[in-house]
Amino acid sequence: DVCFLDFIAATLFLVALVMETVADNQQYTFQAKKYAWRSTNNNGGNKLHEDDKMINDTIRQYSDGFCQSRLFGIVRKPNYAA
């Protein structure tokens, strides 16, 4: 017998799974970009405009070492939050 609660449980599971997957992907992408930025920055790479807020936020996050924006910034521990 499949009841209404089974559908609710399955829906919650799928939402949690999607949330975890998206947040993990955001963290992976962030880490890849951070290491690429660090390698170009250490070799005298691109100089960025200090007046651009988005660039400054990104540099701050790269300097801190972890993603602080988007879904991962809200959830922080996607495996536990989901």
Image: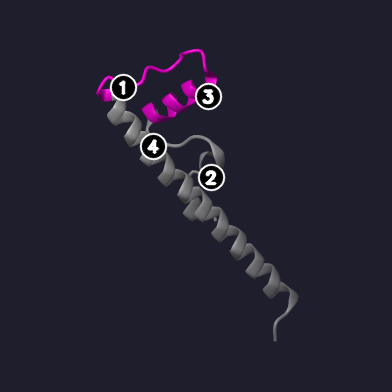
Q: Residue at x 55, y 60 (%)?
A: 17
Answer with left or right where residue 64 lies relative to residue 2.
left
Mark closer to the chain start, 2 or 1: 1
Question: As drawn, is 45 to the left or to the right of 49?
Answer: left
Question: Magenta includes 32?
Answer: no
Tell me which colouring the rendered structure shows: one colour
Residue 45 as seen in the image, left or right of residue 62: left
Residue depicted at 73% across the width and 79% down the height: 3
The residue indicated by pointer 2 is 75
Residue at disc 2, secondary structure? helix
User: Does any portion of residue 77 appear in the rendered image?
Assistant: no
Q: Nearer the viewer, residue 47 or 10?
A: 47
Percent coordinates x, y for residue 28 in the rendering: 41, 46
- Gap between marks 2 and 4, in whole Å? 20 Å
Which element carries disc 4, helix, strand or loop?
helix
Residue 21: horizontal and vertical position, in percent?
Answer: 50, 55
Within the image, what quadrant is residue 18 found in?
A: bottom right
What is the spatial separation of the Cα atoms under label 4 and label 1, in whole angstroms? 14 Å
Q: Position of residue 76 (x, y in %)?
A: 49, 43
Find disc 4 in the rendering and name its residue: 33
Asked if residue 50 lies in the magenta stretch, the reply is yes
Q: Residue flagged by tag 2: what amino acid is it?
A: Val
Distance CA(mark 1)–CA(mark 3)? 19 Å
| Amino acid type for the residue under numbered disc 3 | Met
Q: Are dots 4 and 1 in contact, CB under 8 Å? A: no
* Amino acid type, mark 1: Gly
Magenta residue span: 42-63
Which dot, 4 or 1, sits closer to the camera?
Answer: 1
Image quarter (top left, top right, bottom left or bottom right) of the C terminus: bottom right
